[in-house]
Amino acid sequence: MVNVGRVAVSRRLGAQLLKVTRRSGGWVNGEFVENTAEELVGIYGLVTIAQPRDLQQIPEGDRITGAIRVLTNVRLLQTRDDGLGDIITWQGAQYKVSTVSHDIDYGFYRSICTRLEGD
């Protein structure tokens, strides 16, 4: 297979500098408490509107409005045991990383992100 990972972060092809916030925390007395939130720097990626076929892979697949697909060569994190999913700020709106797929044959990561608020 052809590794096209460099294409996913090529500014010539429309890749943008992404604002990615990585959060972590833990459960205290039955309530999740966020410990840290750090902004990751220097992550470029292609951002497109998610297609219905992309949304069929995630539990909230019927939530079509406000979802984006992000291609990066850096693995973004979805919600996990030791922390919360990454938050991407794009065009003034915040999106939570719902799923991450590693397209290993092509050299990039495909993330589906859902909008946190608004339309």
Image: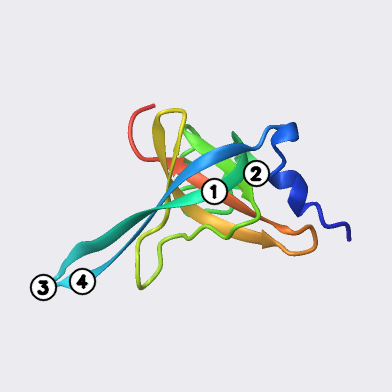
Q: Position of residue 100 (x, y in %)?
A: 56, 58
Mark 4 vs mark 1, CA separation in Å: 31 Å
Q: Tag 3: Cα neighbours inside 10 Å, few (<14), some, or many (≥20)?
A: few
Kind of element beneath mark 2 = helix
- Contact flag, marks 4 and 3 (Cβ < 8 Å): yes
Q: Which mark is residue 29?
A: 3
Q: Nearer the viewer, mark 1 or mark 3?
A: 1
Residue at mark 2:
53
> Which one is earlier in the sequence, the residue at label 4 or at label 2?
4
Viewer-closest of 2 and 53? 2
The residue under the point 60% across, 44% down is: 44
Q: Position of residue 30 (x, y in %)?
A: 14, 70
The residue under the point 10% across, 73% down is: 29
> Which one is earlier in the sequence, the residue at label 1 or at label 3?
3
Mark 4 vs mark 2, CA separation in Å: 34 Å
Kind of element beneath mark 4 = strand
